[in-house]
Structure formats: structure tokens, C-alpha cells
Amino acid sequence: MRPPTQPHNLVLRIAAKMLIPPILMFALYVLFHGETGPGGGFQAGVIFAAAFVLYALVFGIGLARAVATERVLRILASLGMLLYVGVGLASLFAGANFLDYDVLAQERLEGQHLGIFLIEISIGMTVAAVMMIIFFAFAERGVRR
Amino acid sequence: MLFGIYSFLTASLFVTLDAVDVAFTEAAVGAGISTFLMLSTLALTVPREKVRRKRNVIPLLVVTTIGATLVYGTFDMPYFNDPSAPLHSHVARHYIEASADEVGVPNLVTAVLASYRSYDTLGEVTVIFTAGIGVLALLGYRKRRGKS
């Protein structure tokens, strides 16, 4: 599907093209660096979604929908929740309390690292997907009217 | 528009308060996404409010009761800067002193959010997930109808 051509927004389109990769990269940095620096899963998910929102605003919803389809977003959001609960159940089955990461690896601190890492990823997935779901739901409703 | 400016100002305020992660969230959600949602909601609605002749007593009662209960609840809150408040005397000290040994993560905020208070964070993620489902249920239905 070809995008609706918008020849007047040249500056906007070039600026968005230059900005979006760094935004996505920054989101991943915030996600994976959350243990040592500021940030975490929630912030990373929101920033990741903001990049998609910017893309959809500048290049049109149709093109953004080619990547972030309804199905992908729903699966992503649910998968994040499942991963979170799964980590909790894994620690439960390993003989500790729900979401007690000590038993996830051989070493106690390693288990904590692994647990926090997985939790942050799952939060990021769910938050990013839900933010995009909400955005697209509003945006497409507006287009249809 | 004003909301967006306000959010950006708040984000810079958070940066000066050394709460960079809150500033991230404020800038991305407050300035970016919620401004857009506000505008698109305005686009979805009609400019005139529907006038209702009937008086609604029950909603007023519910709102007043809940509001009064909440205000009553604030009377039990500790005074601002009270050193014996539960915030300062309960588990915060333990988190600050022991998190390096127990969790081993340099960022204390991450240690509290993702490890000590993981159960609460699970609840937060569930709330966000539920919000997504709610929006889909309210707004996404007609779209699928039209497509098939």
C-alpha cells in the first residue's frame, strides 16, 4: 500500500527519519541499562511507542500499521504479561516465593539479575504494545469518521 | 497545546530534581502521547454537549460520598516532613542499606521496583494491560466490523 504523498512536509519527514532510529535505540538503552542508570521497562516501552507514534503522525497510519499490526500488538502485550507471571511461577516452582528471583540461577545475585532483566523486558513489551494499541485505536477511529 | 507545554516544563523540573526516569515518562507520556490522545478525542467528539433534562441524584451522592471518604482518609496521614512517618521508619532504611547485598543492582529504584516490590509492579502492568483491552473493547470493535 502506497502512502498518501505529502510533498509539503519535506523538513518534517527528513527530521523524523533522522530522529526515529536514535529514539528506538535510546528506548533499548533505557531498557537494558535500567539496572545501572535511570529508567526501566516502563520508560523504555513508552519511548519505544513514542517513536512509532511519531512515525505514524508523519508518514501516515497505513505505513505504521504495516509493521505494528493489530495482531502483533495484541500478541506482544499478552506475551509481556505472560512472561512476567511466568517468571513469578518459575520462582514459585523452584521452591521460593512468587517473584523471588534468588532461585532462578545458581548464584543468588545472578538470579536477581536475571529476574530483573526478564521483568524489565516484559514490562517494556506490554507497555509499548498497549500504548500503540491505544494510539492506533484513537487514530484509526478518527480517520474513519 | 498547553498540556504539552506544561508536561515539558514538569519534565524539566523532574530533571533538576534528579528524577530523570520520571522525567522520561513525563516527557514521553505527558507531552507526547496524552497530548495526541486529547486532540484525537476532541476530533472524535462533537462540539456541542447533549443537554439532559433529568437530574441525576445518585451519581452526585456517589461522588460526594467517595470524595468525603477520601478527605476523611487524609486526616490519618502523617504530617509533611514528620521524621517518625512510616515512610522513614519502616522498610526504606532496609532497602537503602541491604539492597546492594540482596539484589546487587546499582540503581536503587530498579531494585525496589523490580525486585522488592515486584508484586506491585505486576499489578501496575496488569492495569496497563487492562487499559489496552478496555480501549480495544470500546473503540476497536467497529473497525473490525467494517473490515470483514
Image: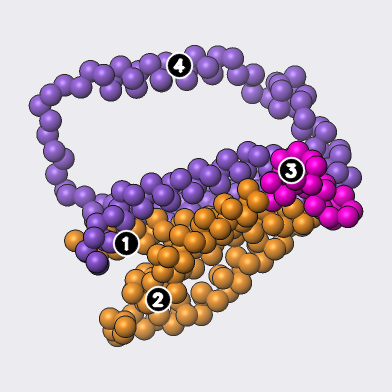
Observer-nearest of A61 and A88:
A88
Residue at horizontal 49 percent and vertical 14 percent from the top: B72
Q: From what the image shows, is residue B48 above or below residue B80?
A: below
Residue A110 on the magenta segment = yes
Q: Are marks 1 and 4 on the same chain?
A: no
Q: CA distance from mark 1 to mark 2?
A: 15 Å
Mark 1 crowd level (few <14, some 14–19, many ≥20, 10 Å Cα): many
| Residue A39 visible, this orientation | no
Tell which chain the image draws in purple: B
**First in sequence: mark 2 or mark 3?**
2
Q: From what the image shows, is residue A16 above or below residue A142?
A: below
Q: Which residue is mark 2?
A: A66
Q: Secondary structure at mark 3?
A: helix
Q: Secondary structure at mark 4?
A: helix
Q: CA distance from mark 1 to mark 4?
A: 38 Å
Q: CA distance from mark 3 to mark 1?
A: 41 Å
Q: Chain of mark 4?
A: B
Amino acid type assigned to the residue bearing label 1 in the image: Ala
Q: Give residue B69's mark.
A: 4
Q: Which residue is mark 3?
A: A92
Q: Chain of mark 2?
A: A
Q: CA distance from mark 2 to mark 3?
A: 39 Å
| Residue B83 visible, this orientation | yes
Q: Give residue B76's mark.
A: none
Residue B129 on the magenta segment = no
Task: Report which quarter residue A54 is drawn in.
Answer: bottom left
* Residue depth check, mark 2 versus mark 3: number of the one nearer the observer: 3
Q: CA distance from mark 4 to mark 2?
A: 49 Å
Query: Contact, CB < 8 Å: mark 4 with mark 2?
Result: no
Amino acid type assigned to the residue bearing label 3 in the image: Leu
Chain A drawn colour: orange
